[in-house]
Image (spheres, coloured by chain):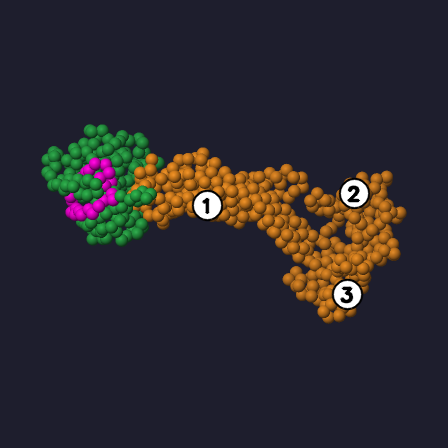
Amino acid sequence: MIVLSSISKRYRMGEESFNALAGVDLHIARNEYVALTGPSGSGKSTLMNLLGCLDSPSSGSYVLNGRDIASLNDNELAQIRNREIGFVFQSFHLLPRLSVLSNVAQPLVYRGLPPKERERLASEALGRVGLASKLKHLPNQLSGGQRQRVAVARALVGQPSILLADEPTGNLDSRTSEEIMALFDALHAEGQTVILVTHEADIAAHAHRVIRLVDGRIESDLRQSPREAACIS
Amino acid sequence: MYQLIESLRAAWINLLAHRLRSFLTTLGILIGTASVVAVVALMQGFSDSIKAQFADLGGTALTLSARNEFSNWNTGNINQLALSDIDLLRYRVEGVRHVAPVMGVSYGGRVRYKGRSASPQVMGTTADYVWVERRFPEMGRFLVEGDDQGRRRVAVIGPKLRDDLNLPRNPVGQYVQIGSEWFKIVGVMAKRGEVFGMSQDNYLIVPFDVGRALQGQNRRLMFEAHFTVADIDEIEQVKERVSRTLRHAHKIAPGKPDDFEVESADQLAKQFGQITAMATLVLGGIVGISLLVGGIGIMTVMLVSVTERTREIGILKALGATRRDILLQFLIEAGLLSLLGGLIGIVIGIVLGHGIAALIPNFPPASVPISVAVGAALFCALVGVAFGIMPASKAANLDPIEALRYE
């Protein structure tokens, strides 16, 4: 589903330029559960931005579901993000003035769906993350774990190809982290492709495949049996 | 379409979230609109009242007068109507109904009654005057044909003159002195009221020939002929006929200008309407500059707001908002902000206009045509959108990664 070939990303900072990514080749198939790890500065965030179509590579090709992403313009990238990618961020990134329901329905606005349909899909998605009772709450009325669940629901609502989570437990305590990870495990079990970016080993342990980046290159790409898979199913 | 409604809703939520700031931002627009609407309301009221007064003057009445350029007055070669022109008008032009010669009588001294005196306008005219002007006496009678033929020293007065001279409530039968001559009052005209603080009822009417005698034979006889047409739709044709007849009678060679002019009251009204429309435009335009200042205020605050909401914009972009979506949302927000300010401004402007009109003595009541109110509202929205373009495109062009990272 995802095919990256010799992807490079070069950033220019004043006179100097450096390669955040230097020739990354990567295949990710449907329903994989992948963790991208690596020390800070290793290029994992850059890779995530590329995978999430927030950015285009300096060179190389990125084919997502048979479409070459590198050749798309801003508007087309926005559409891909809207339809193919579900983002979950470290600091939740909910819209503070909108209700939980409206937050989750927001991506559907850009698909031009009528309000009734949006609300139906959004409350369905909130049901999947166990927040069906909090539809009218504002984000600041929820706990961190609940907010991240809202963010997951928002990521899921458009039925994206990829669920892309950037340090999804970075702002959560360990118990809540486990809850969120259990949620990801369950979504994967339902057939969702999940890509996690994390620097925490025990979070990465949930994944079936761990890709470690160092200095903009893939250092290792290991398949593993997930630690708590048994406990989830 | 859904997106448009959605943008409106989002804009509304954002404006409500910062009520005080939104209000202060739009204050410039509010004040600007209020001033424009107040000015237009006052000018419109002014022009409406003038139109109404012209209508009172008799929309169907036409005036034939001698035409004199400035050079005529300078050289003393002054055109004037002949008494025979009245007869021409009355008997030789088809479509003319009533004709009344009207002269302003210059009389020496003042008009006196029992030790009181006044200086009314004194006019000489004939019995037909009531039919031409459609103004009738309230007490007693108007002039009759016999008054003119018999050179009777009778007068019809305006109610203001009656009050000024302290005449009895019904002064018919009393005698007033004009210069050295005594006149018997036979009627009082109906009250017309004031125009811009000037009473329209301070006058005295005497028979035409008596008026001529009163001002003396050595003065130049200047008079106008007021007349009506039988069919209001034929005004232009009748004017044409009058012109032809008089040119012939005055022996004016083809190509030479007329030595007379025919004007209708509504023509004057139209000219006046053009003048007030122009004045409204100029005044409104000057005040309208304050709207631009208001627009700049909106632009400034929107720019700050974009910076403040950078992360939110990043989130929306990550969720799939295109540049157009973001642009639209901020444009709508600026437009809505400005429109709301404008709507409040319109209401305040109307109140202000009426208030000012009420405060100035004798100023006609203000009036705001609905088209002006709607136009002002639309213009405000337009100002908001125009000044929103810069902040909105700044928002739309934000890089999603940078924006998401923004703290």
Mark 2 is surrounded, within 10 Å at the Cα level, by few (under 14), some (14 to 19) or many (20 or more) other residues, namely many
Q: Mark 3 sits on what residue?
A: B88
> Which residues are the magenta region?
A19-45
User: Foreground residue, B403 or B283?
Assistant: B403
Q: Is A8 inside the magenta-drawn segment?
A: no
Which mark lies nearer to you, 2 or 1?
A: 1
Chain label for disc 3? B
Mark 1 is surrounded, within 10 Å at the Cα level, by few (under 14), some (14 to 19) or many (20 or more) other residues, namely many
Q: Where B210 falls versus B87 (above or below)?
A: above
Which mark lies nearer to you, 2 or 3?
A: 3
Residue A33, can we see it?
A: no
Q: Colour of chain A?
A: green
Q: Do callouts 2 and 1 point to residues on the same chain?
A: yes
Q: Mark 2 sits on what residue?
A: B162
Left or right for A4, reference B76: left
Circles 2, 3 touching at the beta carbon (< 8 Å)? no
Circles 1, 3 touching at the beta carbon (< 8 Å)? no
Looking at the image, is mark 1 or mark 3 earlier in the sequence? 3
Q: Which mark is residue B387?
A: 1
